Image (cartoon, rainbow, N blue to C red):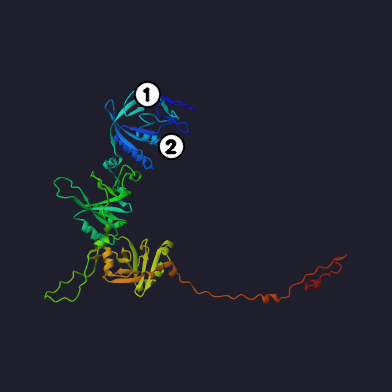
Amino acid sequence: MLDRIALHQTRLRTPGLGLDSKGAALGTKGVILLPSIDRLVALLGVYTREHSLEDLMPSLEIQLVRSKLGTRELVLSFAAESSDRMDRMAETARLVGGFTFTGTSRHFVQYRDAAAPFGYDAQQLLASEAAIVLYHDKFSQAYDVDRPIDLRALLLRLMPHVDPSTLEDSGPRFLVAEQGLGPALIHYFVRSHVEGEVAVAEWPPASAFDEGPVRRYVMRIPDLPARMRPLMGATPGITCFLPVSPGAAVEIGYRHPVNLRACPVFDAAGLVLVRGRGDDPLVLEKTPQMGDLRAFARVELRESGPQASTGASRPEPVRVPLRVMPSAAPWKNVTATWLKPEEMPLLRRLAYVLPRQTVQRTHVAITARGAFVRCDAGIEAIPLGTFFVELHAGLFVPAGYEVTPAVSPDVLFQALGAPSGQVLFVTPDARAVAVSSEAFVPLETSLLEAKPWEPIVAETIEKALEERPVELRLEPLGMFPLGQAEPPAKEPASKDAKET
């Protein structure tokens, strides 16, 4: 049984138990008793969500203990240091169904709770030689240590959970390709101008029947383009990983039960790749030498001099002209239109009904072959001319058409060979028209035609000053104000009045 510690109590029976500055009972160590391994994983997952284990790592120990009845449980011990740390760990343990104790050597009493704000003290110590003796208000139990559990090994044995939200996460990635796919993947990245590093890593053979070590290509891509992410995640033989902490990464589409960034147990000089689907993690104690992807580009040698003819003609290069064919695919990303000169009057009439947002977002370039109109939000508000779809930054093809042969937009843009600062429009007859990007100006600045204004010259003020001002003078009225007033003139009588 336990006694509740009162305020200002100084005598305690439990060895190594003292009072901190707040008056709470506190030993040098804290102990959390957990019934199973899943409760331990839950404790680590909840705690690392907001806190790091870095301050606990020097003293953190996980042990599998056994009671006299043969039951096995888990004990997590750490340096107590302060009641604030103990309160935080006790709240987490209470959430996952664990019990928190404090003490110094072998005897640990229940840590304080709402029923005992200053903690507990044991009424009588158990006479036992066990490594750990725990005193709770509901039980007292002695445990022997069965074996220690390494935190790093435990984290590597945990299977990650499925989490599709990580598929679209941006940032650096690690790609692991099987030996047969590595060279092709390297050349694919080089052709697509994707920067990164590559190394060849070796792992021990999976079984005694393998002749040599397992070799795989490990690539570190700082920024994988968004268009390549679904391909890297769905291609057999290629596994994509998302870094979660220095020296550790988790396969995309999965999430580790514990926040690995808060667990500083992985060496930054090595690499641990946690795979899903129940596969064992790929562990590299030291990251192998990595080289730039661009160093593996295809090498072409210039001929050193004229060579004698051998009588055999060289085969012609495999080159076919570009064609633009109708396509039944739905229209997407229609952001430009081409108006011929005869269609310009329709654009002037349409300008009076265009909404303000469309006018502000639209840019136009006036050329000898007509007007090229662009709007990143969509050009559907201007139903004139020939619509174009933006395949690549600065490359447009007619809407409802597709180019053949079916090459990637990057290859098509490089094959056309347009210099920087040019916007290419591929016409339905497979001709490319280049318009300088500087020629595109906002539509609102070139749309309004202001009428000429007529100046009005104001008259000078000197003419108004030539007029003589009116002078007003007041004189006294005197004794008889109306004495000098003249009577009004009499009107002559009318002819009818005289006859009367």
Crowd band around label 2 with a 10 angstrom C-alpha radius: few (<14), some (14–19), many (20+):
few
| Quarter of the view holding residue 419 | bottom left
> Label 1 near label 2: C-beta < 8 Å?
no
From the viewer's perspective, is 471 left or right of 175? right
Q: Mark 2 vs mark 1: give the one in front.
A: 1
Q: Secondary structure at mark 1?
A: loop
Secondary structure, mark 2, is: helix
The mark that comes first in sequence, 2 or 1, is 2
Whole-percent x, y for residue 248 in the image: 30, 48
Q: Residue at x 33, y 66 (%)?
A: 394
Query: Can you give x and y, in whole percent of width and height, for residue 221 in the image?
Result: 29, 56
Q: Is residue 54 left or right of residue 20?
A: left
Residue type of the residue flagged with mark 1: Leu
Residue 158 lies in quadrant: top left
Eyeballing the image, is 466 above or below 226? below
Farthest residue in the left direction?
311
Give the quarter of the image for residue 366.
bottom left
Label 1 crowd (10 A; few <14 / some 14-19 / many >=20): some
Residue 84 is labelled as 2
Q: Quadrant of the N terminus?
A: top left
Residue that numbered label 1 is attached to: 125
Q: Is residue 184 above or below residue 256?
A: below
Residue 495 location in percent, x, y? 78, 74
Question: Which label sits on residue 136?
Answer: none
